[in-house]
Amino acid sequence: MTTAHDVVVMTTHDIGRHLHCYGRASVVSPHLDALASGGARFAKAFATAPQCSPSRASLASGRYPHDNGVMGLTHRGFDWELTSPHAAAVFAALEFTTHLFGGQHVTQHPERLGFHQMHATDDLGGVLAQENPDRRLYLELNFEETHRPYPPAGAPPPNLEIPGYLPPGPESIEEMTAVEGTIERMDATVGRVMGALEKAGRAGNALVVFTTDHGLAMPRAKCTLYDPGLEVALIAHWPAGEIGRGAVHEQLISNIDVLPTLLEAAGGAVPDGIQGRSFLPLLGGDPYESGDSIFGEKTFHSYYDPMRCVRTRSHKYIRNFETAFAVEVPADIQQGPIFRANPGRYSADRPSVVELYDLEADPLEQHNLAGDPAVATIERELSERLWSWMRDTADPLLDGPVPSPRYQQAMQPDH
């Protein structure tokens, strides 16, 4: 397979797989549709975590949140910090020039990440015009358009689809209309990025990956380990790589698999410590045996709420390590009309340590089968698999409750 000259990673916030090319008919996303039709789309890609900072840290490091230092939000007041090498530093070591466009949410110290330069998102055309065309580039572009708060919704499209885990009614129509408006604006930014790459003569041999950080910012999605919280879009486009136009891959993929794939495509070795696995052979049509499960986790978001899960093609097993609300609804989602219409829907106490769902019979994960003798073998097998993963990755939960940066700060003497 050809070696990619440039590597381009585009991300956006809070939309999961809510795109036209993923079957959402009312979404206007022509540029991402074109990216998918000219490349490969992954139908079963998942984040390691259902929140921004931990998921983005996994994407950038190829490691699970409990291994890369980011078990919660990184902005001031939460203070988690990426301790593993960022993709920018890894590509810089391969003599790529590394550029960040837009924000990042994995550290309060972006100067430590390994980017040679950091810019506003709309600077891309000018930056590319100044770069030596022979110089290899790693470009990371993080879009903000799809993050809450949303602009006024306007009139809903006639074919608007409300996800099944949301309650029917005007509140869901309003919020889904609003988020789809932000997706259309974000998609236009994707179009400008691809146009800038084309104008600079770099589009042909650039491996472009578009992905999302986690599921939709809606109640019972973001900040949960249900599929609506963990599912992400993942699109790869690489004309010179001959990865198959319009290919759709059904293998289970985790976002820790993206970095080793990019490195292999660029001709670089995968550093020790990366826990993801390259799916480049899959892109090239070569033999590839995907794993039969992915793992997800949450430790902190608004508060301490540690949980871990294993998902296979047919089942989801979740272990909850603390008492909490049945689902966490982050503060910005609580401001929306869906939550405000019925807060009690999401504020019940968590009923069970273990949750087990048959994803084929119950794709919305509403009927907990844990303890049912009919599925005892499956429950035991998935429990063993989850504990093995936690041991193999040295999950700090095995040693007791995880202290937060705020706890560690509070324990320091005042003098």
Image (cartoon, grey):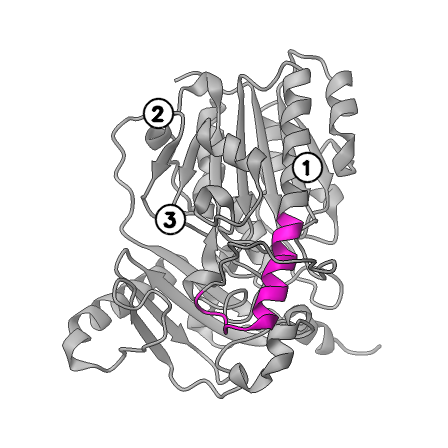
Disc 3 or 2, which lies upstream in sequence?
A: 3
The 10 Å Cα crowd at callout 3, few under 14, some 14 to 19, many 20 or more, is some
Residue at the (47%, 47%) spot, across then down: 255
**How far apart are the two marked residues, 1 and 3, measured between alpha carbons?**
25 Å
Residue 172 at x, y percent in the picture: 57, 68
Residue at the (70%, 32%) spot, across then down: 99
Q: Looking at the rendered structure, which numbered label has been put on residue 298?
A: none
**How far apart are the two marked residues, 1 and 2, measured between alpha carbons?**
28 Å
26 or 22: nearer the viewer? 26
Quarter residue 191 falls in: top right
Quarter residue 312 falls in: bottom left
Which residue was labeled with disc 1? 189
The 10 Å Cα crowd at callout 2, few under 14, some 14 to 19, many 20 or more, is some
183 left or right, relative to 394: right
Q: Is residue 314 above or below residue 288?
A: below
**Going by the picture, which residue comes out furthest to the right?**
415
366 left or right, relative to 156: left
182 or 5: nearer the viewer? 182
- Examine the residues drawn in magenta and state their main secondary structure: helix
Quarter residue 169 falls in: bottom right
Residue at the (40%, 57%) spot, across then down: 393
- SS at circle 2: loop
The 10 Å Cα crowd at callout 1, few under 14, some 14 to 19, many 20 or more, is some
Three-letter code for the amino acid on which mark 2 is drawn: Gly
274 or 278: nearer the viewer? 278
Disc 1 or 3, which lies upstream in sequence?
A: 3
Give the quadrant of the C terminus: bottom right
- SS at circle 3: loop
Three-letter code for the amino acid on which mark 3 is drawn: Lys
Which residue was labeled with disc 2? 284
